[in-house]
Image (spheres, rainbow, N blue to C red):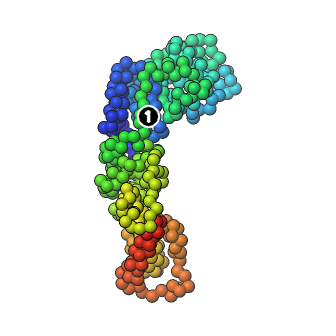
C-alpha cells in the first residue's frame, strides 16, 4: 500500500488531534504522542514536522526499543576516534544530526534510567559532549516522543524519570484506539481504497457492502488502523465472490472478541434464538455451517468431474487453485482418486446433482434446536 500521508477521521478525538497539531507546530513545543500500537503515532509526528517551520530540515527518528542499551548512548551523542574498540573515526550522534530540525524518539519509555539522566541534561541545556570528547556541542533540536505504553505507570514504578517526562511533554497528544471511534472506519476504508487502487490497477477493487462496514464498526480492532489496512488488502488478494467476502469478514470478526462480548443464548427452541439480541451473529454462523456442508459435498464432485485435476476443479467451482487446496486441507478431502474412482467414467449433469440439500438444512436446524449455535 502506498505511503499514508493524511490523518483521516471525523471523530471528536481525531478532530482534536488535528487542532492540536496545528497549534503545536506553530510554537514547536516538545511533545509526546500517546496511543496503542497501530493508531498512527508516526503519522501524527510526521504531520507535526510538515506543518512546522522546520520542514525540510533534518528529521531524525530513533527507536529506543530497537537499539541495544549499550549502543544507544554512542548513537545519540556520537563519539571521537578511539572512544572504544572499533571506534576508528569520529561519528556524529543523532542529536547533532538533528540540529536545526526534529529528533523523534519512538518508544521513549524503553530507554534505560541511566541514559534518561543524560537525555535530561541535553534537553534542559541544549548541549552535550560526544563520548571521549572534552568539547561541548550546542544543538537546536525540537524533540518529539512517542510511546504505546501507560507511561504514568512507568513513572510510578520508577522506570521512567518524572522530570524527563515533564521536559518531553510540554504538550501531549493522545490518539484513541479505533474501537473508540468507529465513526472513522467508513472514511478510513474509502481513503485506503484509493491507496489500494495503485497496487491493484490491473484488477477491479472489491467493494465492501454497507452491512459489512457496519459490522466492521463493531469489531474491537486490537491492531487498530494497521489491522484494518491488512484486512482491506486481504480482501483484494483473495479470488472471491461476495459470499466469500462475507466469510473473510466472519473470520476477522470471530478472531478477537469485542471488549464486552455478549453471551450467546443456550436455547432449545428456534423462538428463543430468534428473540435473542445476538440473532444476527447466529445467522452468520448458520450460513457458514451450511456453506461448509455444501462445500464438503460439492468439492469431491468437482474433483471427480475434472478427473482429479485440481486447477480444472477450481475453475469449475469459481475459486482459485490456492483456495481449493486450502479447502481440501480444511475438510480433509483427498485430491487423488480412491479405488472406487480408479476407472473414471464421464460425469454428466450439474455439480449440484446428488447433493441432499434437504438433509443438510435439516441437520443444521437440528443443531440450532439443540443449542449448538
Q: Tell me residue 50's x, y (percent).
A: 36, 28
Residue 346 showing in the rendered view? yes
How many marks on residues? 1
In this view, 362 is above or below 163:
below
- In percent of the image, x 67 and y 21: which residue is there? 82
Q: Nearer the viewer, residue 283 or 49?
A: 283
Where is mark 1, residue-wise?
41
Q: Residue at x 35, y 20 (%)?
A: 26
State the image coordinates of residue 73 (x, y, percent, origin top left): 61, 24
Would you say 267 lies left or right of 75 here? Answer: left
Percent across and percent down for residue 261 are: 45, 50
Nearer-the-camera pick, 96 or 262: 262
Element at label 1: helix
Which residue: 45% across, 88% down? 345
Q: Nearer the viewer, residue 274 or 170?
A: 274
The answer to whether residue 90 of the structure is visible from this angle is: no
Circle 1 residues within 10 Å: few <14, some 14–19, many ≥20: many
Residue at (33, 25) in percent of width and height: 22
Left or right of 318, for residue 304: right
Say if 86 sits above or below 242 in the image.
Answer: above
Residue 129: where, in percent of width, then height? 59, 15
Quadrant that contains the C terminus: bottom left
Q: Is residue 265 above or below residue 4?
A: below
Horizontally, residue 179 falls left or right of residue 147, namely left
- 203 and 291: which one is in front? 291
Seen in the picture, residue 268 relative to 235 is either above or below; the reply is below
Amino acid at each position: 500500500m502506498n505511503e499514508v500521508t493524511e490523518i483521516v477521521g471525523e471523530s471528536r478525538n481525531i478532530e482534536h488531534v488535528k487542532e492540536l497539531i496545528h497549534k503545536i507546530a506553530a510554537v514547536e513545543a516538545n511533545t509526546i504522542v500517546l496511543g496503542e500500537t497501530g493508531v498512527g503515532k508516526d503519522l501524527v509526528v510526521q504531520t507535526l514536522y510538515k506543518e512546522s517551520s522546520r520542514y525540510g530540515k533534518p528529521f531524525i527518528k530513533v527507536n529506543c526499543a530497537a537499539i541495544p542499551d549499550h549502543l544507544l548512548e554512542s548513537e545519540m551523542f556520537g563519539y571521537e576516534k578511539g572512544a572504544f574498540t572499533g571506534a576508528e573515526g569520529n561519528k556524529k550522534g543523532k542529536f547533532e544530526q538533528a540540529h536545526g530540525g526534529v529528533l523523534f524518539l519512538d518508544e521513549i519509555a524503553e530507554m534505560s534510567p541511566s541514559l534518561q539522566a543524560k537525555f535530561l541534561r541535553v534537553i534542559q541545556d541544549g548541549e552535550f559532549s560526544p563520548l571521549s570528547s572534552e568539547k561541548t556541542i550546542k544543538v537546536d533540536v525540537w524533540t518529539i516522543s512517542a510511546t504505546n505504553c501507560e507511561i504514568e505507570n512507568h513513572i510510578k514504578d520508577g522506570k521512567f524519570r518524572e522530570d524527563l517526562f515533564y521536559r518531553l511533554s510540554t504538550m501531549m497528544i493522545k490518539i484513541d484506539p479505533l474501537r473508540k471511534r468507529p465513526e472513522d472506519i467508513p472514511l478510513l476504508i474509502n481513503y485506503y481504497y484509493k491507496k489500494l487502487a495503485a497496487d491493484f490497477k490491473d484488477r477491479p477493487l472489491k467493494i465492501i457492502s454497507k452491512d459489512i462496514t457496519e459490522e466492521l464498526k463493531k469489531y474491537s480492532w486490537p491492531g487498530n488502523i494497521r489491522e484494518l489496512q491488512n484486512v482491506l488488502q486481504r480482501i483484494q488478494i483473495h479470488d472471491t465472490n461476495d459470499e466469500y467476502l462475507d466469510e473473510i469478514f466472519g473470520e476477522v470478526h470471530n478472531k478477537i472478541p469485542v471488549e464486552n462480548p455478549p453471551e450467546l443464548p443456550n436455547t432449545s427452541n428456534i423462538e428463543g434464538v430468534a428473540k435473542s439480541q445476538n440473532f444476527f451473529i447466529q445467522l452468520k454462523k448458520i450460513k457458514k455451517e451450511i456453506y461448509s456442508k455444501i462445500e464438503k459435498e460439492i468439492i469431491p464432485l468437482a474433483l471427480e468431474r475434472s478427473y482429479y485435476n485440481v486447477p480444472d476443479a477450481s475453475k469449475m467451482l469459481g475459486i482459485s487453485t490456492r483456495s481449493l487446496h486450502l479447502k481440501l486441507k480444511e475438510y480433509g478431502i483427498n485430491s487423488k482418486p480412491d479405488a472406487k474412482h480408479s476407472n473414471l467414467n464421464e460425469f454428466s449433469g450439474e455439480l449440484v446433482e446428488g447433493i441432499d440439500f434437504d438433509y443438510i438444512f435439516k441437520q443444521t436446524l437440528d443443531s440450532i434446536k439443540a443449542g449448538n449455535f
